[in-house]
Amino acid sequence: MKLLRVGTAGAERPALLDAEGVLRDLSGLVTDIDGALLADEAALGRIRAAAEAGELPELDATGLRVGPPLARIGKVVCIGLNYHDHARETGAEPPAEPVIFFKAADTVVGPHDTVLVPRGSTKTDWEVELAVVIGRTARYLESVEEGLAHVAGYAVAHDVSEREFQIERGGTWDKGKNCETFNPLGPWLVTADEVPDPQALSLKLWVNGELKQDGTTAEQIFPVGEVVRYVSQFMTLYPGDVINTGTPAGVALGQPEPKPFLRAGDVVELEIEGLGRQRQELKDA
């Protein structure tokens, strides 16, 4: 299923995109799309049955904002340097273990919402990423298979980053990762049954119409199941938590000087095979 949330920010309603691309209203069945829903197999089953029976009312998508596909996100865990080609382009050694950092849940915005360039920023960068949404409580998982079994679904994430704040301003990466609007998510939460192999997805990103990133999750150093297993050794993952699993080559940081960092007025578009497409215009904060 392709689950999404539509409407003005803070007042989104749950919806489903059916096999014919028609937007369907879920508000008669569930109050929202969140961790509680993803952990409730019976509720998900009712949605599937209603969709298959053609019982869900159609929504007019004209002019309707698409919000983040998940409400009440607990935490956003991010994996750094998780693509072989990205490590090569930045001159970094591939990590022996996954690099973990966090984004605050309040950085998450809709897939087409405005992204704000922080005040004083000269090195705002783009990163298309596969987001993993947790559907079952995960703690001390023992295998890759267990890791995958705890995934409710997948989404497109844009891990916007400010490289000066991240690298040159002391402290941890979090300074360059947590600026407002720095994690567009969606348009859809695609349930795991529709993604039989998360290591066989193409990822693309364009800036002002120019293709910048053209990668595949097959290049991940630590695949999805291993990432979930590994993270569960250090923290408990709950339904509705999100893991951004890293970005392929092609970011501004890896380009020759002068590096083409983002500015107000730029337009970024990104997509992952089967998971939908995003578009953001950048403006000054």
Image: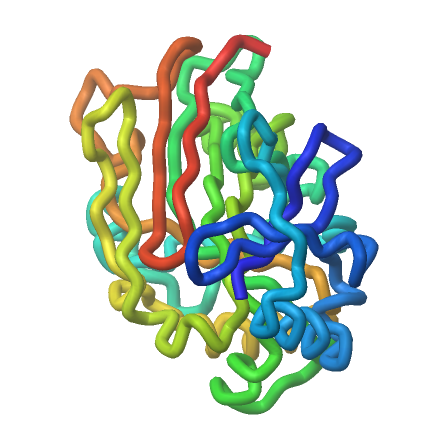
- Report the side of 137 relative to 177 (left or right): right
Where is residue 184 drawn, in percent x and y?
A: 54, 37
Q: Quadrant of residue 255?
A: top left
Q: Residue at x 69, y 73 (%)?
A: 44
Residue 176 drawn above or below residue 230:
above
Q: In this figure, what is the number of numbered marks? A: 0
Position of the C terminus, as image quadrant, is top right
Q: Left of 117 or right of it: where is 179?
A: right
**At 78% from the left edge and 33% from the top edge, which residue is drawn?**
10
Residue drawn at x 35%, y 32% is 269
Q: Residue furthest left?
A: 256
Front residue of this view, candidates 143 and 44:
44
Horizontal side, residue 69 vs residue 198: left or right:
right
Residue appearing at x 30%, y 32% in the figure: 253
Would residue 65 be found to the left or right of residue 226 on screen? right
Of residues 278 and 219, the one drawn nearer to the viewer in this rendering: 278
* Above or below, 173 relative to 137: above
Q: Position of residue 5 (x, y in %)?
A: 65, 45
Q: How far across and down, in percent of the image, does residue 262 sit?
A: 37, 19
On the question of residue 171 being in view, the answer is no
Q: Nearer the viewer, residue 13 or 92?
A: 13
The answer to which quarter of the image holds residue 153 is: bottom right
Instruction: Residue 216: give x, y in percent of width and height.
Output: 25, 59
The chosen color scheme is rainbow
Residue 167 vs residue 156, the one in the foreground? 156
Q: Is residue 196 above or below residue 14?
A: below
Q: Is residue 127 visible?
A: yes
